[in-house]
Amino acid sequence: MTATARRARPVAVGALALATALVTLVEGCGAVGTEPGAVQALDFTAFPYPAVVTGDSLRDASGQVAPLRATAYDVDGQPIADAPIRFVSPDTGVTIDSLGRLRTSRGPGSLRVYALVDGLQSAPRTLLVTSAPDTVVATTGTLATLAYALPDIAGNVSGDLTVAVRSLTNAAAPNVTGWLVRWRAVHRGDTIAMGDTTLAVLQSSSGRRSALDTTTSTGTSTRRLRVFANRLPTPTDSFTVLAEVRRGGLAVPGSPVRFLVRATPPAP
């Protein structure tokens, strides 16, 4: 977000019980006066992880407690060092200390967070609250057969390869939502880079190419394997697809889940 951010209408923020009754909002950023040295724009950086475990602090992918981040900019679009940015949430069961470290005792669901500085408030960001991930399992068969067509067509795609991330310690809310799942395809022992379209690529159910996913409200993540049949080194070939889930830098029990996709030529 730069200092040229467009102007947005003022809105009331009584839910936050702020001393200032009106602020301006513009998507993830807000803008105020143009006096020299004044904060002109505020950019609330994305969360370090898409979900926080109930009863725990917000952590990054490595498992380290990770503070919230935002950057204030002056009229020239330059970052303002040591701007007194703070973070607040209008939701109960949430604490955020002066260093931006968030902790929640809320049950699974979501919470809202705002960044504030010098009377300027960002638009809210929503953070998912979820149960602790204790296991990951396949919810579809781990062996799939793709009878491809020649010449190659866009429909040379495997069926759904789906995993579920579950909590064994929270029977009331066993589905772990918003958790990162890293997918990768392997051919003859070599991992296929995401940008490599020589033999195959991973894609979502909607056809978007991506190897990184977050679990849905049902705690599941799905990928399909698109095979480029014209380029297979042998008429019948196979690929391994791995779904990896980690917490605190360590593999969640059951990870990685392994799928075998067998590509076969059309019937004579």
Image (cartoon, rainbow, N blue to C red):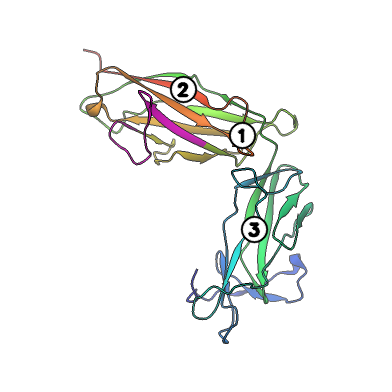
Residue 175 position by quadrant:
top right
- Inter-mark Cα distance, 1 to 2: 21 Å
Is residue 141 part of the magenta span, yes or no?
no
Observer-nearest of 215 and 196: 196
Q: Is residue 255 left or right of residue 13?
A: left
Q: Secondary structure at mark 3?
A: loop
Q: Is residue 187 magenta?
A: yes
Disc 2 is placed on an element classified as strand
Task: Give the mark nearest the N terminus, 1 or 2.
Answer: 1
Which amino acid type corresponds to the residue marked 3 in the rendered image? Answer: Leu
The residue drawn where x is 75% and y is 30% is: 169
Question: Residue 68, labelled with which disc?
Answer: 3
Decide if residue 36 is on the left or right side of residue 13: left
Q: Residue at x 69, y 36 (%)?
A: 132
**Label 2 is placed on what type of residue?**
Phe
Numbered circles on residues, count: 3
Q: Position of residue 92 (x, y in %)?
A: 79, 54
124 vs 167: above or below: below
Residue picked out by circle 1: 250
Can residue 108 be seen in this snapshot? yes
- Residue 224, quarter of the rendered image: top left
Between discs 3 and 1, the one toward the N terminus = 3
Give the mark toward the camera: 1 or 2: 1
Whether pointer 2 and pointer 3 mark residues with C-beta atoms closer than 8 Å, the reply is: no
- Binning the other alpha carbons within 10 Å of mark 3 as few (below 14), some (14 to 19) or many (20 upward) gives many
Q: CA distance from mark 3 to mark 1?
A: 23 Å
The kind of residue tagged 1 is Leu
Instruction: Tell me which numbered mark, 2 or 3, is placed earlier along the sequence.
Output: 3
Which residue is disc 2 drawn over? 259
Classify 118 as above or below 208.
below
Instruction: Magenta stretch: give its range.
Output: 182-200
